[in-house]
Image (tube, coloured by chain):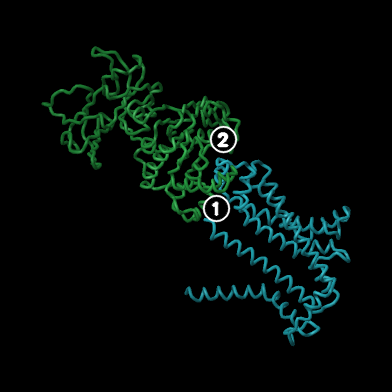
Chain colours: A green, B cyan
Amino acid sequence: MSEPMLGAAIELLDLQKRYGDVTALANVSLDMPAGEFVTLLGPSGSGKTTTLNAIAGFLQPDSGRILVDGSPIEAVPPHKRNIGMVFQSYALFPHMTVQANVAYPLKRRKMPKHELQRRVAESLELVGLDGMQQRYPRELSGGQQQRVALARALVFRPRVLLMDEPLGALDRRLRASLQLEFKRIHRELGITFVYVTHDQDEALVMSDRIAVFNNGSIEQVGTASELYERPTTLFVAEFLGDSNVLPGVIADGPAGRRLLGQGYELALPEAAALATGSRGVMTVRPERVTVVPDTPTAPRRCGNTLAGRVKQVIYMGGIRRLEIDVAGFTMLAQEQAGTGAAVAAGDPVLAVWDADRSVVLPDEQGEATAGAVTGSLEEV
Amino acid sequence: MREPRRLALKAFCVLVAVLLVAPTLVVIPMAFTSSRTFRFPPPGLSTRWFGELFADPAWMDSFVLSLKVGGVVVLLATSLGTMAAFALVRGTGWWRAPLNGFLLAPMIVPGVITAIAIYYVFLQWHLSSTFLGFVLAHTVVALPFVVLTVGTSLQGVDRRLERASTSLGAGPAATFLHVTLPLIAPGMVTGALFAFLISFDEAIISLFLSGPFNRTLPVQLYQSVSTTLTPTIAAASTLIITLSSAILLLSAVIASRRRTKHV
């Protein structure tokens, strides 16, 4: 587009929404700085779409505030909020051509015809759909339909664009190419994008900032690497990527503070802030775990060590995954293919990792069980 | 084994079709007879009975009355029926099922019962044998058809489209006008055609409501048959059949176009 559009900052303060006995939003507060690509990530029913609909104005929160550039918008009806929205179902008007669909928001704003024509053409060019003006939505593929929906949501130059699982109905390859497209358009326009998805891959690829939702509240907000490297709750650690989860009780010992679990005693990372005697969970990413053959002559390793037996070796292209049976549970290790020691199923091995490369999180309820947890990354 | 069975089925279908349609179609050649009496097959062909039909003020008055009543019924039944369909499809609450039953009742209650009830009430309200009386009575019986066709259309409308329209800056009125209305229009047109057909063909209630001067076409037909028996009656019947068939055909065309147009 010719003139630069600038994004608006959105601030959510203590949003709450209940449906009878069901709490859709428990207490959602979130800062979305102007021009950022913010993803609301979480399993279905976690409140991410409810939050999006509250920003769009399709539902009224029971309490809380929604501020756009500092001014409250709860009382503004949805059609006057000037916020673009893209739906998973595309929601193109079936009785209108592509041209008429994209012109729709401009017509409602009574824009003069020549200006309207120019803007529609511009918007379709932005999404790469030149020359499709006279087609009907039913004549387009799913990916093309979503591009039209995007052009339509951007043509009136909103300062905020909301996207509700826009790629949910598309196949994997198309999803990947549209993700890059969304990122490009976000960069070009500089407006604030709020993107809802349950697919962590999507969130990691596109977002400046991710808010992880669970049970109607936000577990953690941060950049992709912050969430992955330094999760602050067990849910985030388990939801994003794969983790080895090792629960236990924090205890003082002669060699410093340790985590005592069933069949293991582990050194804590320096940063662990849990009180002695409380329950905690150590989470270690598979790529932080090194596997060495367990021979009597093997040199003692520094760091945490668990002895076990290789259950399975899985090659996944450039990487290799090892499933290791350790005293009643399974641990996952991941190595670059071609590196590390040659081990095969059935070999006795040691799983070794540096305590400072692990994260220890509180586990008040003692709910965690030892073993490997694979995040939603695996679903296709 | 399968082939003879399919043949038998075809034969049966043809038989049923003949039984249903043949008596009606017999009227058409009789309307073009050259004879003064009802004789089948007609001894010769002529259009003189149509000439008499169009020249006779009694026939023409009733024909025009039927068209006028039908026209107003279309407007009333379509607008009221559409509103009712919205309430039934979009509303929430316990009242929807009883309201639905109430609105569809004229289709289920025997015509004579409705006719007697309307006749009794309209006599007291001085609506009997008036234009307004015909319009109101026909609207009652035409309404269920509009409610059904528009309701079905409305159920097929994706509500996310209305949400999208709202997010694009259209208020509730603009959203209805530009999104919802075009999507239910085929259902409304079908409902309107049915409403006209119901009104135009309606005989029982009209018989009760008709006076010596205000008669709808079916009533005029009935009265003529009971007094004189001329081929004019066949000509009038042919007129009704042609008009009704044309309207049915039209609604079939609309329905099939709708199927091919929207996914």
The x, y position of residue A318, in whole percent, is 23, 40
Judging from the image, mark 2 belongs to the subunit labelled A
Q: Earlier in the sequence, mark 1 or mark 2?
A: 2
The x, y position of residue A375, in whole percent, is 35, 35
Q: Which residue is mark 2?
A: A81
Quarter residue A365 falls in = top left
> Which residue occupies 44% across, 53% down?
A141
Q: Which residue is mark 1?
A: A96
Quarter residue B201 falls in = bottom right
Circle 2 packing at 10 Å, graded few (<14), some (14-19), many (20+), is: many
CA distance separating discs 1 and 2: 24 Å
In the rendered structure, the answer to whether residue B226 lies left or right of residue A3 reads right
Circle 1 packing at 10 Å, graded few (<14), some (14-19), many (20+), is: some
Q: Amino acid at mark 1?
A: Met
> Which residue occupies 64% across, 67% down?
B249
The x, y position of residue B175, in whole percent, is 61, 45
Report the number of discs.
Answer: 2
